Image (cartoon, rainbow, N blue to C red):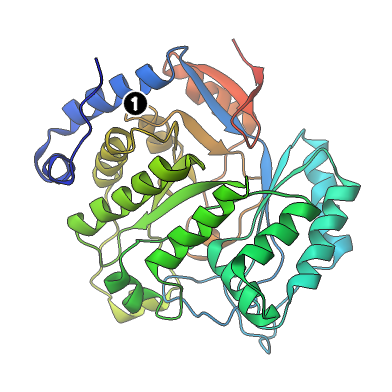
């Protein structure tokens, strides 16, 4: 018998009124239906931020710099190669490739970069470039978004991350990132990628100025596009990290979301996103203990060992976790740890 799909009203009621323990039980049951073997996965990868130069000036970001700042940078290909070499030494298979939205780099630079990495390191999957990067590459290069995606895909871009979604509410986006693309543009870039055979992830950053209703709208936009294309491999949610950000200066009374809030929203996401197979735990922002708890609230993936991460670290989240610790955390709750690739295919299990 088909499971009744949650309505927006159902989801809102769960966020506002459900018992947290009951939510965990419900989300775990749904997770078990999707992943009956009890395998929890993670990927060995590295975030490479090829530049910190960005003109978008998001108030929630502490990572970006302007072109003339003393600590602004664009990595050379040799510097990027050195980072990939270090990743290969620990058995890594993926790079998450993102930068600031550089005002001057055009499509040819990105094509050369992707082709260089794909040619030199064919064993590495390039999971890169957020929708706002793709949108701006198109604008500065005077070509369409579709053309950017096609050209980078040909050179070796395998998939794109969901970064830049934040909350898919234009009311909130106009406050926290007024120069960023609108919600429907974010959705359409992922739609175009999916139709070209480029899979992606969906993300959400909560804990700024959004309402519960706007969180549900975000979930719904992801679910609707997944119904249409089936192109999202996973959903990843994390809380706003405010340290060193202009947004916290502007709204100093903004409270850091609790672990309870994170687990509650994660469980509702697992129940609402019935067509997205994988939900990732955000141990990077929540810490290893709540990252482990998330596995009992619907998450089936611990994300990445994250050999390097610079963006949320700039805003005060400094958690780190080695492969062995991930394996232990998963074993500790009675599940089977497994290393996966970008496509969520199991590469190695630890019985």
**Closer to the camera in the image, 123 or 195:** 195
**Closer to the camera in the image, 142 or 302:** 142
**Quadrant housing residue 179:** bottom left
- Does 123 sit left or right of 62 as displayed? right
* Residue 245 picture location, percent across and down: 43, 74
**Quadrant housing residue 210:** bottom left
**Closer to the camera in the image, 236 or 135:** 135
- Does 145 sit left or right of 239 as displayed? right
Q: Which residue does the image show at 70% across and 58% down from the upper left?
A: 150
Q: Which residue does the image show at 28% across and 27% down from the upper left?
A: 27
Is residue 242 visible to the viewer in this orientation of the structure? no
- In the picture of the structure, the residue carrying the numbered disc 1 is 296
* Residue 280 picture location, percent across and down: 46, 38
- Does 261 sit left or right of 69 as displayed? left
Could you classify mark 1 by the number of other residues whose Cα lies within 10 Å: few (under 14), some (14-19), or many (20 or more)? many
Q: Which residue does the image show at 68% across and 47% down from the upper left?
A: 46
> On the rendered image, what quadrant is the N terminus found in?
top left
Secondary structure under the numbered disc 1 in the rendered image = loop
**Closer to the camera in the image, 262 or 171:** 171
> On the rendered image, what quadrant is the C terminus found in?
top right
- Does 234 sit left or right of 272 as displayed? right
Q: Which residue does the image show at 27% across and 76% down from the upper left?
A: 251
* Residue 316 picture location, percent across and down: 47, 61
**Quadrant housing residue 151:** bottom right
Up the image or down, 206 lies above or below 248; here it is: above
Is residue 223 visible to the viewer in this orientation of the structure? yes
Up the image or down, 252 lies above or below 163; here it is: below
How many numbered marks are there? 1
Residue extending furthest toward the bottom? 68
* Residue 224 picture location, percent across and down: 35, 47
């Amino acid at each position: 018998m088909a499971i009744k799909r949650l309505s927006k009203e159902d989801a809102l009621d769960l966020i506002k009124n459900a018992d947290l323990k009951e939510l965990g039980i419900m989300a775990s049951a749904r997770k078990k239906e999707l992943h009956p073997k009890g395998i929890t996965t993670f990927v060995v990868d590295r975030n490479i931020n090829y530049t910190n130069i960005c003109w978008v000036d998001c108030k929630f970001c502490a990572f970006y710099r302007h072109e003339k700042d003393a600590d602004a940078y664009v990595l050379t290909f040799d510097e990027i190669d050195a980072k990939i070499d270090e990743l290969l030494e620990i058995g890594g298979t993926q790079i998450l490739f993102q930068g600031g939205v550089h005002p001057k780099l055009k499509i040819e630079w990105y094509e050369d970069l992707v082709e260089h990495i794909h040619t030199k390191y064919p064993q590495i999957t390039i999971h890169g470039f957020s929708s706002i990067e793709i949108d701006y590459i198109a604008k500065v290069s005077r070509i369409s978004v579709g053309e950017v995606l096609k050209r980078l895909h040909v050179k070796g871009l395998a998939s794109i991350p969901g970064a830049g979604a934040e909350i898919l509410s234009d009311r909130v986006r106009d406050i926290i990132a007024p120069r960023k693309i609108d919600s429907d543009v974010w959705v359409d870039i992922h739609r175009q990628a999916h139709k070209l055979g480029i899979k992606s992830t969906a993300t959400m950053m909560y804990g700024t100025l959004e309402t519960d209703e706007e969180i549900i709208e975000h979930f719904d936009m992801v679910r609707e596009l997944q119904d249409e294309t089936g192109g999202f491999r996973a959903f990843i949610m994390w809380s706003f990290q405010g340290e060193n950000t202009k947004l916290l200066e502007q709204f100093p009374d903004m409270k850091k979301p609790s672990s309870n809030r994170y687990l509650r929203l994660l469980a509702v996401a697992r129940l609402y996103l019935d067509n997205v197979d994988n939900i990732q735990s955000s141990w990077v922002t929540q810490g290893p203990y709540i990252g482990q708890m998330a596995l009992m609230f619907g998450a089936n993936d611990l994300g990445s060992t994250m050999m390097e991460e610079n963006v949320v670290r700039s805003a005060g989240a400094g958690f780190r976790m080695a492969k062995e610790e991930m394996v232990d955390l998963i074993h500790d709750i009675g599940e089977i740890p497994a290393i996966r690739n970008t496509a969520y295919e199991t590469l190695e299990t630890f019985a």
